[in-house]
Structure formats: structure tokens, C-alpha cells
Image: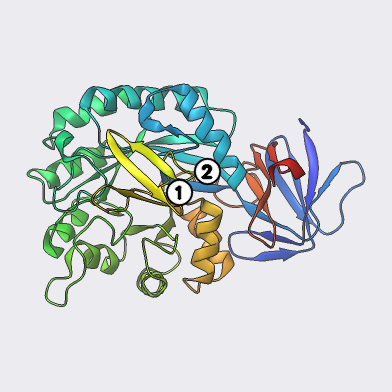
Amino acid sequence: MSESAYYVKAAAIYCQDRVLKDHYMLVENDRVSAFTQTPQLAFPIHDYGDAAIIPGLIDLHIHGREGCDVIDSKMSSIETISNSLVQHGVTGFLATTVTTDWQQTLEAMAIIGQAYIQQPSGAQVLGGYSEGLFFSEVHKGAHNQDYFLELSQSHLEAMISAAAGSLKVVALAPEKPGANSLIKFLTEQGIKVMLGHCDASYEQTQSALEHGACGGVHVFNGMRGIHHRDPGCAGAVLMNDTALVEVIADGIHLHPTILQLIYKLKGPQKIALISDCINAGGLNDGQYKLGQMDVFVENGVARTASGSLAGSTLTLELAVKNMHQLGCVSLLEAINMASIVPAKFLNIADQVGSLAAAKQANFAILDSNFTIQATYVKGQRCFLRSADNG
């Protein structure tokens, strides 16, 4: 389907700061043009009945889906992940690496850079996210400590070079020697630094934030937690007004009361819902690989042999549902946490992340069962649910 101008109609349209009822959204030349209750007859109408139009979701932290992983270092894997994501309303994502050997890491960065320029046919690659290599053994989670490296400028420069301008986020443990100076270095390169898989104290984390770090990797998971005499890394990122926290709202990584606590502390503007999905996403229970590590999925929950959670099989529209229902957050705010909040974090909110005139027409159709019925990227419908795919 390729149309230069058309209307999209649904029972509700979720704009950033309001919900429009029984409106039409006009799309012209791949961008949102206007909202109206009285469409012109000249343009075709895509009518989705009682469903809702939501902005295209943005997954800041995802490793893979349907048997493919970013660390495969293959364009075909990026393409599979991209086309899987649009089935779940995601129109943009950061291709996220996991700890593995150094050469494979550089190869994966090079493929991310290639995908960033060429772009797959579904959800767009918004850049790369390095999760791995520079972590602490204490809270390593599903990262193989055998491949952990010294945090050095030479390592960072090599990754930046391999990624050819596509590296957007680097996660690291702030207690690593030289962390603060290298956080400043990355920030000067326009790369965001997130803190996680660490045993950092409150003071170490706060110092890293003062040197330019932006927030916490999947908050509470893979970091020193809150103790009443030691607020830890979790306490620091939650109490810092400017820090963003990634949240895995799958009902497993975080208790519903903790979701509510995070919301009370951070508010709707500093929470980014992520999937942290691994290559088992969309597939049956069984044994998989995360980097070089064996992962076992049972009842949709991924764990290492030692029992550590190993990413998730979550999809982002279900993260929105869970944050809404378990976190007691309004649906509009939950949607924003997976759209405009990550867009602002990546400094691309002038183009994507919400439904507004002149922005890219990236949007999805969400029904009352929280199932994605269709997804549009740059105005073109790249997914339509049929009876055959549920």
C-alpha cells in the first residue's frame, strides 16, 4: 500500500497531552497533517472502528526477537527483529548488544551502523545501545563476566568507530576505574551513558550523574538496590530529578507496588518503558543463547542456569498495558513512556514520538484487548493483522 494522502479514523487518538474522540487524522506525504471531525471526501479513509490510534512505540533497549539477536552481526537478523517489532506497534528501536567477545562486539556495531543507514523494512533502527563489557561481576545478571573489559577510552573509541555514527547509548558500571572521565568523554561525543549491572554506591552513582550520565539501566535489576542505610544505585537514579529510568513492566522484573513507587518518584516524564527482549521473544519455551550464555525460557520467563533473569520475552504494547494496569498509571501516560519519553531521550522528539502536525506519520492501531491491529512507518502501512495472524 502506498498512498500520498489519506485519513485514519478510530474511536480515540492518543496525542501527547490529550485524547481526541471520534476524530480523523490526515496523513499527507508520510507526515501527520491535521486532525478533524469533518474529513474531505477527496481522500480515502482507513477506518479502524472502536480501536485507538497511538504513536509508534520506541523501544530503547531490545536485543532480539524470533530467534535473531543483534549480536548475530547479520543484517538478516536486524530485518527479522524489525519486522517482528511492527507487529507490536514499535516503529523505532535501539539495536542493543550483549556481553560477548570483543571482535564480535565490533562486528555487531558495524552491522548496526549499516542498518542505521540502509534501514530495514519494518521498525526503524534509531541507533545502537551497548549493554555489556563494562560491568561489575557482583550484579552481572545474564552477562558473561569472562568477556568483561577494562573501561578505557581506546575501547570506547573502537566501538564508536565501528558503529559509524550510530552508537547512541553506552551502559556501564560507575564504580569502574576512570568511569567519570569516560562518562564525560562519551557525553562530549553525543552518546548517552546509562548506569547498570553495577555495585555502585549512592555516592558513586550520584557522582556519575553529575559527570553526565543520564540514568539507570532497567532500574532495580542488575544494580545495588535500596537499603535504609545505603540508598545504592537504585536510590540515586530514582531520587535524581534529571535521571531517566528504564522500566521492564512485565510483572516479573518489578512488583506492581514497585512500579507504583517508581511512578511516584519519577513521574511520567522520566520513565522509559523497555522490553529488554531477547531472541526467544515470539517463540516457544526452550533453550536459547544470549551472547555466549545459555538461557532457559519457561512460561515465557528467561533465566540463566544460575537462575538470574536474562532479559525478557516482553513486547512493548504489553509493557504499556502492564504499566497502566499494574502501575496504576493513566493509559495516556503509559503510552507516552513508550513513545515521546524515549524520543526526547534520543533528541528526536521534533520528528517522532507523538502524533502532531508535521511529525513523521509513525503510528499503530491498538484495540481494546491491547492487540496491535496495524502499524504505519513514515506513513506507509507495514503491518496489518489478519485472521491468519491472530
Residue 359 in view (yes/no): no
Rendering coords of residue 59 (x, y %): 47, 46
Q: Position of residue 80 (x, y in %)?
A: 53, 31
Q: Residue at x 47, y 29 (%)?
A: 78
How far, Cα to Cα, is label 2 from label 1?
7 Å
Categorize mark 2 by other alpha carbons within 10 Å: few (<14), some (14-19), many (20+). some
Can you say whether 193 is above or below 223 in the image? above
Amino acid type, residue under disc 1 in the picture:
Thr
- Residues marked 2 and 1 touching at CB (< 8 Å): yes
- Residue depicted at x 50% and y 74%: 328
Q: Earlier in the sequence, mark 2 or mark 1?
A: 2
Along the viewing direction, whichever of 217 and 289 lies nearer the viewer: 289
Residue sitting at x 34%, y 59%: 245
Instruction: Determine the residue positioned at 62% across, 41% down.
Output: 360
User: For mark 2, what is the residue?
Assistant: 282
Q: Quadrant of residue 265?
A: bottom left
Residue 176: tell me if it is visible: yes
Q: Position of residue 258 (x, y in %)?
A: 36, 71
Depicted 157 relative to depicted 284: above or below: above
| Helix, strand or loop for disc 2 | loop
**Depth check, front residue: 11 or 284:** 284
Residue 152 lies, in percent from the top left, at 12, 34
Q: Is residue 11 left or right of residue 70?
A: right
Provide the residue designation for mark 1: 313
Query: Which quadrant holds the N terminus?
Result: top right
